[in-house]
Each structure stands twice: as structure tokens, then as C-alpha cells.
Amino acid sequence: MKPLVYLAGPISGLNFDGATSWRDSVKEVLGEWGIKALSPLREQEHLKQVGIFTNAAEEAARLESPMSMPKGLTIRDRWDAMRCDVLLVNLLGAKTVSIGTVMEIAWADSKGIPIVAAVEEKSNPHEHAMLMHCIGYRLTSLWDACDVTRQLLAC
């Protein structure tokens, strides 16, 4: 079975393409190394019509899709974060704290899952002692985060 990586990172404040473009690129890179990557937006193409994601509860209720409803997305994201082999987090360029991403980091950490994060050295809104303590590998580029993930999963 291929190793499994969950791709965590902010969605609010972005449109569908902005939230998925980096995930698609990372998924392709990891796939070349035989690693399967999961996106929280997989099978959610219907969300393209939302525009900029702002209030997930209102957006999800408007779309009336079980996997997009607050409960559905919480259950799936928690399951993914707690079953993956590595949680790869992209916090680069975050404008505000992503509560969902923080929850995914906490869920993975509670299971002892290694967390690899791409985050600026300074001036990131996620800069908090407890959160940074949970991140096992902090890198300043997404490529370096992918490479560390590959090294962790190398057999």
C-alpha cells in the first residue's frame, strides 16, 4: 500500500483554484515518489461556484452537499488527518490563522503522526509556541517540505 499524506493548509480567503493549485502540484510531486496525497477538497469541484471561501457554514448550507456541510467536512478531514502517515502543511503566505488547519495539526499530533510544514521564518499568523511545537519539521519552501516528507516515508 502506498504511503498516505494529508495536505493541510488554509482554504478561507481563497477561491477553489487558489486552495487546490498548490495541493495539485504537491500531489503530482509526491506521486512521482509513489506517495498518495489527499486533499480536503477532493471530489468537491462543485465548490468552484462559491468564489472566495469566507463562511464555510453558510457556503456549505447553500450548496447542500453532505461532504461540504460542516459536519461532513469535519468528519472527513479529521479521519484523513488521523489516518495519514504524514501531515504536510502549507502555511506560506497565510493572511490569518486557519482554524481548520490548526485542528488538523492537533488531530495528527494526537496520534503521533509526523507533521511537516512549509512556513515563513517570521511574520506568519500561525506563529504560536504550542502549534510550532507540534510541527516536527519546519521548512521555508514547499519543495523542501515535500522532500522531507519523501525522506520520512522512504523504505
Image (spheres, helix red, strand yellow):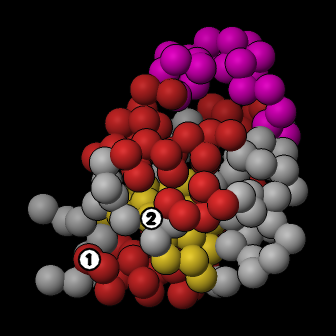
Q: Looking at the rendering, which quadrant does residue 3 occupy?
A: bottom left
Relative image position of residue 148 (x, y in whole percent): 42, 84
Instruction: Say which element carries label 2.
Output: strand
**Considering the image in quadrants, where does the C terminus appear?**
bottom left
Q: Is residue 62 above or below residue 134?
A: above
Relative image position of residue 153 (x, y in whole percent): 26, 77
Q: Nearer the viewer, residue 25 or 153?
A: 153
Residue type at mark 1 is: Leu
Relative image position of residue 105 (x, y in whole percent): 51, 51
Relative image position of residue 131 (x, y in whole percent): 60, 56
Q: Earlier in the sequence, mark 1 or mark 2?
A: 2
The residue under label 1 is 153
Is residue 115 rendered to the left or right of residue 64? left
Q: Looking at the rendering, which quadrant does residue 59 occupy?
A: top right
Residue type at mark 2 is: Ile
Query: How many numbered discs, if any?
Result: 2
Is residue 76 rendered to the left or right of residue 120? left
**Considering the image in quadrants, where does the N terminus appear?**
bottom left
Residue numbers of the magenta segment: 52-73
Q: Residue at x 67, y 34 (%)?
A: 47
Q: Residue at x 72, y 26 (%)?
A: 56
Asked whether residue 61 is in view, the answer is: yes
Mark 1 neighbour class, 10 Å CA radius: few under 14, some 14 to 19, many 20 or more: some
Q: Give residue 60's mark.
A: none
Is residue 121 rendered to the left or right of residue 29? right
Q: Residue at x 31, y 48 (%)?
A: 111
Disc number lying in front (1 or 2):
2
Q: Nearer the viewer, residue 47 or 88?
A: 88
Magenta stretch contains residue 56: yes
The residue under label 2 is 115
Q: Is residue 128 above or below residue 82?
A: below
